[in-house]
Amino acid sequence: MSKDRLLTGTIALDAPVYRAGSARRSGAEFGVVRGAAQAIGRIHWSPPANLHVTTKFIGEFAENRLPELQAALEKMPERPPIEVTVAKVGFFPNAHSARVFWCGIEAPGLEALAADTDASTSSVGVAKEERPFSPHLTLARIKERLDLAPLRNAIAAAPSLDFGRFTARSFFLYRSQLRPTGSVYTKFAEFPFSKR
């Protein structure tokens, strides 16, 4: 692959409370669920630094065209801050053939942000999204068939599946690089919701 390629581009909200680790330390319910997942083994838990809420997957994009992409994103309509609630958990595609373990996201205004982002990126040649928008935090990836009963039991026994809240005032263009230990996400550019 030539050096003028962005290996993987993603547009997303940062999840600062989880990045700092405070929710993991103080959220007993989250800790129980995470502990059950770790006990199973062979589940690839997402590092705190990788946690984000994707609004648009870009994929490969020519590095010399990044100014075009950034200019398109900077023209997006202004909007108020978005209040984000992290609650509930689930599996993609389902609990019996799980490949991804995730936390759900409830955030009024986030779907509109995703739609505006999709429209802006399509103006510079990024394929429009065809799947319904399904915001989430990827907690872990499951690369082989495992007995997830302990994890499902921990989820069922948790007194609450409300894992905290944060306020988003900007979104980010992330650059992802695949390393032997997994993907590493680096913030490439920030786009505040309001320029005032």
Image: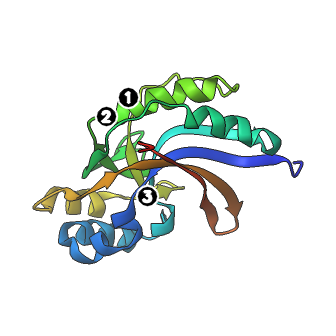
Between the residue at mark 2 and the residue at mark 1, the CA separation in whole angstroms equals 5 Å
Residue at 41%, 68% (x, y): give it: 19
Label 2 near label 3: C-beta < 8 Å? no
Residues at marks 3 and 2, CA–CA distance in whole angstroms: 36 Å
Q: Residue 186, position in %: x, y?
A: 61, 60
x and y percentages locating residue 94 in the rendered image = 37, 41
Give the vertical position of 94 relative to 165 (above or below): above
* Residue 17: quarter of image: bottom left
- Of the 4 image quadrants, the one containing the C terminus is top left
Amino acid found under the numbered disc labelled 1: Ala
Q: Earlier in the sequence, mark 1 or mark 3?
A: 1
The answer to whether the residues at label 2 and label 1 have Cβ atoms under 8 Å apart is: yes
Where disc 2 sits, the SS reads loop
| Tag of residue 11 | none
Observer able to see residue 191? yes
The residue lying at 65 percent from left, 36 percent from top is 71
Residue bearing mark 3: 146
Residue 21, position in %: x, y?
A: 36, 73
Q: Is residue 26 above or below residue 99?
A: below
In terms of sequence position, does the residue under pointer 3 or pointer 2 come before the other? 2
Mark 1 Cα-neighbour bin, 10 Å: few <14, some 14–19, many ≥20: few
Q: Nearer the viewer, residue 187 or 181?
A: 187
Horizontal arrangement in the rendering, residue 18 relative to residue 67 (left or right): left
Q: Residue furthest bottom?
A: 25
Is residue 47 in view from this perspective? no
Report the amino acid beneath label 3. Leu
What is the total number of numbered labels drawn onto the structure image? 3
Packing grade of label 3 (10 A; few <14, some 14-19, many >=20) is some
Give the residue number, with chain letter if any, for mark 2.
Answer: 109
